[in-house]
Amino acid sequence: MSQPSLAPFIRSRPWLKRWMVPFANWYASAQGYRKLGLRADDLIPEENDTVQLALKRLPPKEAYDRVFRLRRAFQASLSHQLLPPEEHTKPEEDIAYLSPIITEIEAENQERDDLEEMFVPKRKQVAASVKKSH
Amino acid sequence: MMLSRSSISRSCTRALQRHCVCRRTQIRSLAAAASGSFQYETGEEAGVKYASRDLPGPTTTLTVVAKAGTRYQAQPGFSDALEKFAFKSTTRRSAVRMIREVELLGGDLSAYHSRENLVIRAKFLREDLAYFTELLADVISKTKYAPHELNEQVVRVMKLGQKNLLANPSHLAINSAHGLAFHRGLGTPLYPTSSTTFSKYLEAEEIYNFALSAYSKSNIAVVANGTSQSELSKWVREFFEDAYTGGRKLESPPSKYYGGEERIAHDKGNVMVIAFPGSSSFTSGSSWKPEIGVLAALLGGQSSIKWTPGFSLLAKAASQHQHAHISTQNHGYSDAGLLAVTVTGTASHVGKASHSVVEALKKIASGDVSGEDIKKATALAKFQALETGQDINAGLEATGSGLITGGKAYQIDEIGQAIDKVGEDKVKAAAKSLLDTKATVSTVGDLFALPYAEDIGLKI
């Protein structure tokens, strides 16, 4: 699922962005997933219908690479090792490959809910008269 | 909430226009009824050809006919895929929104493809013409062809179509007969027959490229029934401006008749299709042979009246083999046709009835038919041709394909006259020439019991 994010707020303010970017870069590498060869989008919990559908919609190459990264990270984690530095995810490789698809699916579902929801208001007079008769 | 603000304002302006549109159509419809004309008026706006026929009535049928049937598809299954992609998400609205909007207005959307054409059709109330013209323009020029829609929806429906074809002996036989008669082009099956289509050829990107050619302005025609020419031309000019231009031109070599025999084992029924080179459709112009229509009616097989086999030769023959049904149809295309006699039923009766098909043809060729029967057949052929023209859907497709190829619209009056002129000797000559050519025989079912083409006296 896509999470709430401050990023759009910050990105729309250049002065704030200039101030935040170094901190954000430091924070991203401090999280440690890059040292296991993962990307940020690999960490999105996948145990729900939306993300499952998004995973199905990945192009075959992307899906294969994702599984490879996850298995390599599991292996590294089990053996209590970090990957050698040349295999770390580089900041420019750490791209959002899955979250745009998730956003799209959420928008689709939202639209479907909006269009299929039919709101039938209770008529006030009838409700009042029913109450009176009792 | 349901409709965006822009679409609300649009529908408001349309509601304002509605009054004057209604008044004008009423005047028109009276005039049309008085003149009693079924003629199409044709024109061209924004590079798109269109035709309309102002039949009086409260509803309109609007179609976009594209010359992109299975004959012209770039790779197997593409026409089918393009048809299934109709009314999927476009860059302007999602598939769900499209359906909900149409539900609000009351209307009916559908799409189908034949061997030569891909038809996208909307039926709706007369006053909603502007909305539905925009919708169809949207579908042909702004569909996204998203890979996930292909994989999740289009392919699923296509596979059902494939199963339907493979499970139905009649469909299988008629597709096989076309394959034998024309090999490629017209011989391509209407729905994919093998799963190679799905595993090897279908890709969203490629389908988009095919759509660029299939829906390019020179390759489509807009045909409407139940709307005035001026209304249609106005909305076509406004909404079809953005339709694709250019694109690779879809080509198919001129059809050539081959013929041959194919036998397919099947356990769901027994069908024999015995076919000969027939007549192309009326809109093709010179290669249309009215005598083939009369011959088809004379062979017949199904009675048009109750409780009697009727006059047609094959209906009389079929009444002796009660578990066999015979029907004759000329499948007309733009440059060729296939006159096909279909025999269905139990294996033994189909075998016997197929003998009588050949006997009937020989009888006609030798002139052993009464003049009265030929007169009846001429009347029936004329009725059937005119009824097809009047039938809204068939007429729309025929007119559209006629417009695209630069021929004529389906003008009913001329057809009637041409069929009236067919004489007895012409029908006999047609039957004789059929027997001289190589036949096409496609047999599906219990192959142990069903005869070979040689056995029933046909040359292969």
Image (spheres, coloured by chain):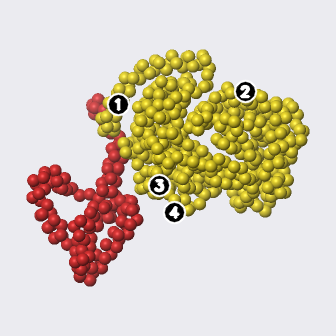
Chain colours: A red, B yellow
Say whether residue A79 is left or right of residue B454: left
Q: Mark 3 Cα within 10 Å, few/some/many (few <14, many 20+)?
A: some
Q: Chain of mark 1?
A: B
What residue is drawn where x is 33% and y is 75%?
A: A71
Could you tell me residue A122's position as x and y percent? Answer: 31, 35
Q: Foreground residue, B40 or B226? A: B40
Nearest to viewer (mark 3 / mark 4): 3
Nearest to viewer (mark 3 / mark 1): 3
Could you tell me residue B380's position as x and y percent? Answer: 75, 32
The residue at the far bottom in this view is: A79
Residue hosting label 3: B206
Q: Chain of mark 3?
A: B
User: In the rendered view, would you say B262 is above or below A80?
Assistant: above
Camera sees residue B373:
no
Residue hosting label 1: B10
Q: Are marks 1 and 4 on the same chain?
A: yes
Q: Chain of mark 2?
A: B
Q: Earlier in the sequence, mark 3 or mark 4?
A: 4
Q: Which amino acid type corresponds to the residue marked 1 in the rendered image?
A: Arg
Mark 3 in CB contact with mark 1 (< 8 angstroms): no
Nearest to viewer (mark 1 / mark 2): 2
Quadrant of the image for the C terminus of chain B?
bottom right
Residue A50 lies in quadrant: bottom left
Q: Earlier in the sequence, mark 3 or mark 1?
A: 1
Residue hosting label 4: B199
Q: Which amino acid type corresponds to the residue marked 3 in the rendered image?
A: Glu
Mark 1 in CB contact with mark 4 (< 8 angstroms): no
SS category of the residue bearing label 4: helix
Quadrant of the image for the N terminus of chain B?
top left
Which mark, by number, is residue B417? Answer: 2
Q: CA distance from mark 2 to mark 3?
A: 46 Å
Q: Mark 4 Cα within 10 Å, few/some/many (few <14, many 20+)?
A: few
